[in-house]
Amino acid sequence: MKNRGTYLTKTVFSVIFIAITLVVWQIVALIVNDDFAVPSLLSVGADMLKIFYVPSFSIAYFSTLLRAFIGFALSFITGVLLAVVAKKFAFIKGLCVPLVSVIRLIPTMAIASLLCITLSPSVASVAVCFTVVMPYVYSSAQAMLESVGDELLEMAKVYGVPHGRVLSGIYLPTVKKPLVELLGTAFSFALKITVSSEVVTGALKSMGGLINTAQNVYLSPSLVVAVTVWVVVTGLFAELITHLVATLLDKRRRA
Amino acid sequence: MNIEGLKVKYKDKTVFENLCLKIENNEKVAIVGKSGEGKTSLIKALLKLVDFDGKVTNVPEFSVVFQEDRLVEELSVKENILLVCPDADVTNVLNKIGLLDSERTKVKNLSGGMKRRVAIARAMSKRCEMLVADEPFVGLDVATKAVVTERLKEFVADKGLLLVTHDLLQAYELCDRIIIIDGNGVVEDRKTSEFTVDMAIGRFIANS
């Protein structure tokens, strides 16, 4: 009952936050009264619908989604595996500290610019996504594994619990919910990075490419915002789905 | 079980210089002492959870109630027991300890006292030669403590017991022998029948 109340409160606050953001946006647009500087909600909404029916939009949308998914999948698998290995071997963990810090510090646009020299724009976008998202997944997965206390592992050792059961009975139940949540946040992050890198690499048939075209060819800020909002909505949808799955998993176990 | 010349070393502290103890099969022994005097260190050494110097031989098969509950919060009561003992008669052991209604409840939704009972039930589910119990009754109310004490007595009737406690009354009730230790080693080691409350209180006053 308490969980349901908390969930309801969170949902209500999210809706209120979105509503306030939209109202503020519209007020600012009305005050500025220049669609070129601050596009109004109406013009962005109209552009969103307009591009939705353009065939090249769906091609760009799904191409970007595919690139983001490949980058995300590679990052997720590598990041989680690396975190598991780092948990087991202290020297790997030691090696990962500077590596992850350095990768995290390199500006995304610099990575994109460097990679698009040697790689095709599509592959470069996936590679940029991997280099940025993988350290994020690694750090999150590592924090999850660290949340499994040594005391539980000592207990398992004393009771002679086999490794497989330690994994399925101690690690998995503890990290399952945050891991599923991480799937959503990592994917929306991957999508954001992929679109950003597509803008820099100039990948064809991409949401980043559409942003470039809207800005440089059509000189239409409302079209840029419309494409961006489609990206944001997709990321939010992914996060919402994984959040629901995580909550369902939690409830199923409790039942 | 023989403990000879035990010395437990931590980074900034050494507990015991030369602790020697012999515990017979099926003997019920209480280890009593002030906080920080090495009771839990002794248990950890026996369970090989800390580095130590000295010899520990003829170690029986242990089941353990840790000082902390050490339960997987995301698992149910039943799953926690099956995790360490897949062939346990969970219903029977939970019934004994008054937790049958909570069999499918996640541990994170239990009270502190209930968690303590789950930790005890888990230890009672495992076949062993000696039960090691580190402050097993912490967090239990008087009535529950009485029930759990009776169940523990039944459980260890044909086994050894190594009980770490501050509670001398519990030591009297459950054990044949009481050993008082301090950071250096054994201060007093007597059969419970030879051990008067006055002596115990005197020891504590002398040590404090």
Image (cartoon, helix red, strand yellow):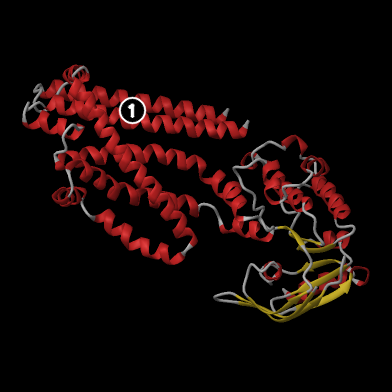
Which one is nearer the viewer's eye here, A211 or B185? A211
Quadrant assignment, res B110? top right
Q: Residue at x 11, y 24 (%)?
A: A32
Tell whether A24 sits left or right of A183: left
Q: Which secondary structure, mark 1?
A: helix
Quadrant assignment, res A206? top left
Residue B125: percent from the left, percent from the top?
A: 78, 50
**The N terminus of chain B - image quarter:** bottom right
Residue A193: percent from the left, percent from the top?
A: 25, 41
Residue A194: percent from the left, percent from the top?
A: 24, 40
- Characterize the local packing of mark 1: few (<14), some (14-19) or many (20 or more) Cα atoms within 10 angstroms: few
Tell whether B45 sits left or right of A93: right
**The C terminus of chain B - image quarter:** bottom right
Which one is nearer the viewer's eye here, B84 or B114? B84
For residue B204, above or below residue A135: below
Which chain is home to disc 1?
A
For residue B153, above or below residue A18: below
Q: Which residue is mark 1?
A: A17
Residue type at numbered disc 1: Phe
Which one is nearer the viewer's eye here, A127 or A93? A127
Quadrant assignment, res B174? bottom right
Residue A122: percent from the left, percent from the top?
A: 21, 40
For residue A76, above or below residue A209: below
